[in-house]
Image (cartoon, rainbow, N blue to C red):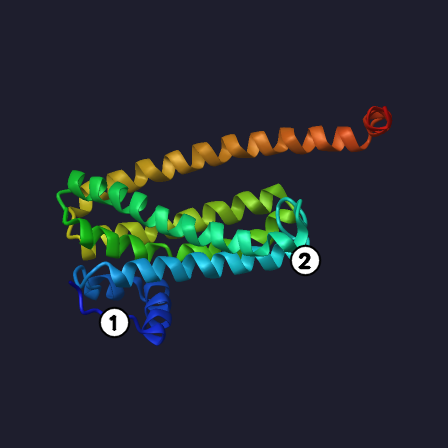
């Protein structure tokens, strides 16, 4: 059983360090000490992201506007982000373990969980900038790519510095992941443009009147 204790001030400090001093941080990150720390870290990142998304939702700056249930959806937004962070932690850890194995790195599950929890710092960052997508789908794409780039940078350093994977093989994997992210982002952009075009046509056509007639009947 782990005797590890969670320190909130250390959590804040570590979050800053992994972003501004990435290489030094991952060079000294602990890869053992129990599962409590990384799980709590994921919970906090998820909760912060949920709170930020809730705020944008209230202000009508989320991608879907105020939302079907308005402010009443707040607790559910926060809970869904928090649960999603916990699930994402373990799914991400399995993926990270597979990548680490391919790159001849550390395949200890706990070590990969702890590194995966660190990388989840991008979750509240993504949620913070998500309101920009309300103004433009292109801004949404730019933010998405920037967050993905940050994630890959953290992943790369986590693999070679914390999990001791082979740098050359790791670089190839990161390049492949980057290419896939760009491809799927562009596909997603095309889908969003079609959806927006449909909504604009709907709003500017007689379909509104048609829907009113249907509702009356």
Could you say which is closer to the camera, residue 25 or residue 91?
Answer: 91
CA gap, disc 1 and disc 2: 37 Å
Q: Secondary structure at mark 2?
A: loop
Q: Quadrant of the N terminus?
A: bottom left
Q: Count residues near mark 1 (Cα–Cα under 10 Å), then give few for <14, some for 14-19, many for 20+.
A: few
Q: Secondary structure at mark 1?
A: loop
Q: Is residue 203 above or below residue 146?
A: above
Q: Position of residue 111 (x, y in %)?
A: 19, 54
Q: Which of pointers 1 and 2 lies earlier in the amino acid sequence?
A: 1
Could you say which is closer to the camera, residue 71 or residue 175?
Answer: 71
Q: Residue at 31% x, 43% y: name it.
A: 91
Q: Quadrant of the C terminus?
A: top right
Q: Residue at 37% x, 68% y: name it.
A: 16
Q: Position of residue 210 (x, y in %)?
A: 84, 24
Q: Is residue 106 above or below residue 179?
A: below
Which of the labelled discs sits on residue 66, or is there none? none
Residue labelled with disc 2: 59
Which quadrant of the structure image shows residue 175? Answer: top left
Could you say which is closer to the camera, residue 39 or residue 160?
Answer: 39
Which of the labelled discs sits on residue 5, or is there none? 1
Q: Is residue 180 above or below residue 157?
A: above
Which quadrant of the structure image shows residue 4? Answer: bottom left
Relative to 141, 134 lies left or right: right
Q: Count residues near mark 2 (Cα–Cα under 10 Å), then give few for <14, some for 14-19, many for 20+.
A: some
For the residues bearing labels 1 and 2, Cβ distance under 8 angstroms: no
Q: Position of residue 26 (x, y in %)?
A: 24, 61
Q: Residue at 52% x, 49% y: name it.
A: 143
Relative to 70, 25 lies left or right: left
Could you say which is closer to the camera, residue 134 or residue 49?
Answer: 49
Q: Residue furthest front?
A: 217
């Amino acid at each position: 059983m782990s005797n590890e204790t969670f320190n909130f001030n250390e959590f804040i400090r570590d979050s800053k360090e992994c972003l501004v001093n990435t290489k030094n941080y991952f060079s000294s990150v602990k890869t053992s000490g129990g599962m409590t720390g990384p799980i709590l870290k994921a919970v906090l990142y998820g909760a912060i992201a949920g709170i930020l998304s809730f705020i944008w939702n209230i202000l009508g700056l989320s991608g879907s506007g105020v939302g079907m249930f308005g402010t009443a959806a707040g607790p559910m937004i926060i809970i869904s982000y928090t649960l999603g962070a916990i699930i994402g932690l373990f799914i991400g850890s399995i993926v990270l373990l597979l990548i680490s194995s391919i790159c001849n790195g550390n395949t200890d599950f706990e070590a990969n969980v702890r590194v995966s929890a660190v990388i989840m710092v991008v979750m509240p960052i993504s949620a913070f900038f998500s309101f920009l997508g309300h103004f433009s789908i292109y801004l949404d794409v730019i933010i998405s790519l920037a967050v993905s780039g940050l994630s890959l940078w953290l992943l790369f350093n986590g693999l070679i510095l914390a999990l001791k994977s082979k740098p050359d093989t790791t670089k190839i994997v990161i390049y492949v992941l980057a290419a896939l992210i760009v491809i799927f982002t562009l596909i997603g952009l095309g889908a969003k443009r079609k959806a927006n075009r449909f909504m604009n046509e709907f709003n500017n056509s007689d379909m509104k009147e048609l829907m009113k007639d249907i509702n009356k009947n």
